[in-house]
Image (spheres, helix red, strand yellow):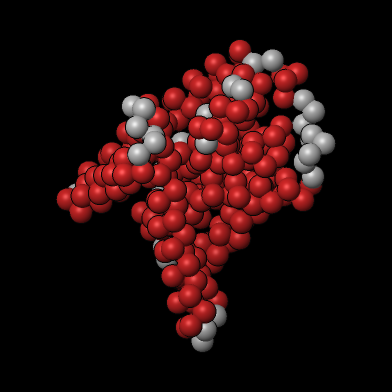
Amino acid sequence: MLLGGTFGGEIFAILGVSVVAIGNSAPLAILIGGLLALCAAYFYVKLARLYKDKGATYSFFLKTYPDSHFAAAAIGWMVGFGYISTLALYAFMISSYFCAAFSIEDYLWSHQLVAGSVILFFSVVKLISVKGMGELEDVMGYTKIILLVIISALLTWKSDIQKALPIIESNSSWASILMIAAVTFVAYEGVKLVIHAYHQVDAPERNIPRTIYGAIVVATILYVVLAIGALPTIPKAEIIAGGGI
């Protein structure tokens, strides 16, 4: 669940943004983003083991501050808005690749039509069958992992690492690197998903921490390898124009 929710669209969405802002420092920013995700995951794990509740962010806050109903409601709405924004980001990203592949990217309506169709398709599948959506997510998750491993291996094999140096270019600063690291945090948003299934996990006290920490470490390694392989192999102008790999 976590690897499927973490791998894939995120790296395609954030790499282009990172290269635009900080160039060769993109892998460093992604690594820092992974460390930030581990810090956030530590507190999620502690709260999950304390409250043993599947409500995650909203529920944790409400149980910690039971009299702060307005703040809890605001956090619940922000979490919902965050998921909606992420869905919009991924739908737009898919439409950008699709329209570019069929040379219709100059038409605004084509982006809107494809992005809307993507959201509509998954909404219909979810409404028809939750189990079917779960099976579809499994297939897509495993497919994404296999494809990203293949892509990272090919990029690393063909790349000339000298083209990715220096790591921190003259037009980059630590402030900009940290800012982009915060942006890349969206790539690790899926790590909270398993907490929603707390009571369906065998031995959750032991397995949830292992699952969350393990998924973040694996995702961070793969993201960094992808970025390192892409920078010296794919011209930066193409990464920027395409928004990612």
The answer to whether residue 118 is left or right of residue 61 is left
Q: x, y percentage for residue 162? A: 75, 18
Q: x, y percentage for residue 56? A: 47, 63
Q: x, y percentage for residue 83? A: 43, 57
- Which image quadrant is residue 47 in? bottom right
Q: Residue furthest bottom?
A: 67
The answer to whether any part of residue 146 appears in the image is: yes
Q: Residue furthest right?
A: 170
Counting every numbered tag in the picture gives 0
Q: x, y percentage for residue 160? A: 69, 15
Residue drawn at 48 percent across, 67 percent down? 78
Report the front residue among 74 and 129.
74
Q: Is residue 109 above or below residue 75?
A: above
Q: Which image quarter is the N terminus in?
A: top left
Q: Is residue 201 above or below residue 18?
A: below
The answer to whether residue 121 is left or right of residue 88 is left
Q: Is residue 121 above or below residue 166?
A: below
Residue drawn at 61 percent across, 13 percent down? 157
The answer to whether any part of residue 204 appears in the image is: no
Q: Residue furthest left?
A: 128
Report the front residue among 214 and 11.
11
Report the front residue among 33 and 1.
33
Residue drawn at 20 percent across, 54 percent down? 127
The answer to whether residue 229 is left or right of residue 166 is left
Report the front residue among 116 and 145.
116
- Which image quadrant is residue 217 in? top right
